[in-house]
Amino acid sequence: MKHISIDTIKTWERFYRANFINCLSGFKSASLVGTVNAEGQSNLAVFSSIVHLGSDPALIGFINRPLAAAPHTINNIKATGVYTINHIHPSFVAKAHQSSAKYAVDINEFDAVNLEAQFINSIKAPFVGESFIKYALELSEIVPIKQNNTFLVIGAVTDVLIDDKLMEEDGFIALEKAGSMSCLGIDAYYKTELFERFGYARPDI
C-alpha cells in the first residue's frame, strides 16, 4: 500500500490534488441549488457537499466555497433567504455539470445549460423542472469556516416535491428508482443501486 504524506500532496498540481482529496471522502450526492437574486434573476449551480443535519427540525446544509471563487449562490441566498435543492438524474447530468462553469453574474444558468426553471406557488426560488426529487429551504444560518474561508449554509426544509411512487411505507425514499446520481472527485457521476437495507440496530439484536 502506498504511503503519501500531506507534504507530498501539497506539491501536486492544483487540479490533480483537488481530484485526489475530493475522492477520499467517498461518493457524495450530486445536486443542483436553485436561487434567485434580489432583482429576480435565477441562478443554478451544482453542489456535491449536501449534508443532512437533522430531521426535527428538518435541516440540510451545504458547503459554499470562498466568496471570491463562488459568490453567486450564497449572495442570492443572503438576499432572499430561500433556495431549492434538486436531485440530478441521468437524462440531464451533462447539463447539470455544465452549471459548474463560472458564468458571469448576469447570466441565468437555467438558460445557459437549457434546464427548466420551475416556480411553485409563493416560493421565490426556482426548482429544476426536470428533477424528480426537489425541496425548498429557508436560510437558517451561515457558519463561516475560518480554516479555508468556506461557509456552511444551513437551511430549514419548507416544501418537498416528489413522486409518491418513490416513497416507501416507512418513509424511506428509493433514490435508485428515481435515478438520483452520486458523484466522485470533481467531474465523475455514478448511477446508484440498492445493495441492502438493515433493520434498526440494537445491542441485543
Image: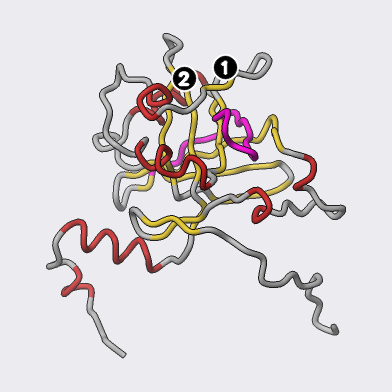
Q: Is residue 135 magenta?
A: yes
Which residue corresponds to the image point at 48% horizontal and 35% vertical from the top-left? 33
Residue type at mark 1: give it. Answer: Lys
CB under 8 Å between discs 1 and 2: yes
Looking at the rendering, in which quadrant would you find the N terminus? bottom left
What is the magenta range?
Answer: 128-144
Closer-to-camera residue (147/85) = 85
* Percent coordinates x, y for residue 98 in the rendering: 35, 38
On the image, numbered disc 2 is attached to which residue? Answer: 36
Residue drawn at point x = 37 percent, y = 20 percent: 108
Looking at the rendered structure, the kind of residue marked 2 is Val
Describe the colour scheme in one phrase: secondary structure
Label 1, label 2: how far apart the Cα atoms are: 7 Å
Label 2, secondary structure: give it.
strand
Quadrant housing residue 197? bottom right
- Relative to residue 119, is residue 55 drawn left or right? right
**Mark 2 crowd level (few <14, some 14–19, many ≥20, 10 Å Cα):** many
**Which one is in front, 99 or 130?**
130
Query: Residue 126's quadrant in the figure?
Result: top right
